[in-house]
Image: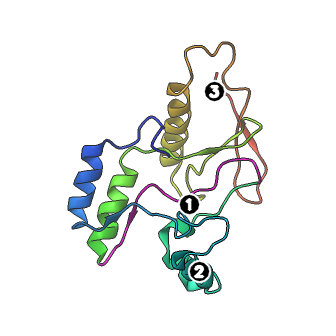
Amino acid sequence: MRPSDPGWPTGAQWVQLGRDVEGRLLKPVSPFLNCDESGGNSECATGLQGLRNPYFIGDEPALTQASGWVDAWTCESSAYAVAAERTADVAAAVKEYAAGKVEFRNDTGGNVHSVVGKFSFPKEKLTDNINAMINQIRKMKPQTSKGQYFKKVVLKGTMTPAVYLAVN
């Protein structure tokens, strides 16, 4: 979910999460943001040196998200991160994240990808998650969009056959 998406938390909700984690809510900034083409400044040199260390990459919130297919979606860091120092920080961040949020990605072919649960989930929980996902996408349909919005919906686990769902 990105700041431009429906359902993005309000400024007040981010402020509340910042309070809940005692000020450890961060806005990740790439260490290469101010690099010019020559890479001549010391911040750039330090950042480039750090890339040789996998722990540097893992500890830098602005460098940890690198998933996606080429040209399928923009690879960028999270808008916010929590510098957790105790379990309560993690619990507060998870509570905020899980409060009715639906996360998905779409590729250039118009396909939407989302995790809706695990194989071990009860049937009712999976059904609720699938319905929430479909309903969220329906809410996001532009008013100018005409015709059939869903061509097909497929539920598929890793290494399992696909199950087609009737949603229209």
- What is the magenta segment's predominant secondary structure? loop
Q: Mark 2 and 1 residues: CB-CB less than 8 Å, in contact?
A: no
Residue receiving disc 2? 45
Q: Is residue 149 left or right of residue 2?
A: right
Residue receiving disc 1? 120
Q: Residues within 10 Å of mark 2 (few under 14, many from 20)?
A: some
Query: Residue 54, percent across and down?
Result: 61, 84
Q: Which part of the image, by quadrant, shows the C terminus?
A: top right
The quadrant where residue 81 appears = bottom left
Residue receiving disc 3? 167
The quadrant where residue 26 appears = bottom left
Mark-to-mark CA distance, 1 and 3? 24 Å
Mark-to-mark CA distance, 2 and 1? 47 Å
Q: Is residue 140 left or right of residue 93?
A: right
Q: Is residue 71 magenta?
A: yes
The mark that comes first in sequence, 2 or 3, is 2
Q: Residue at x 55, y 40 (%)?
A: 130
Q: Which residues are magenta?
A: 70-85
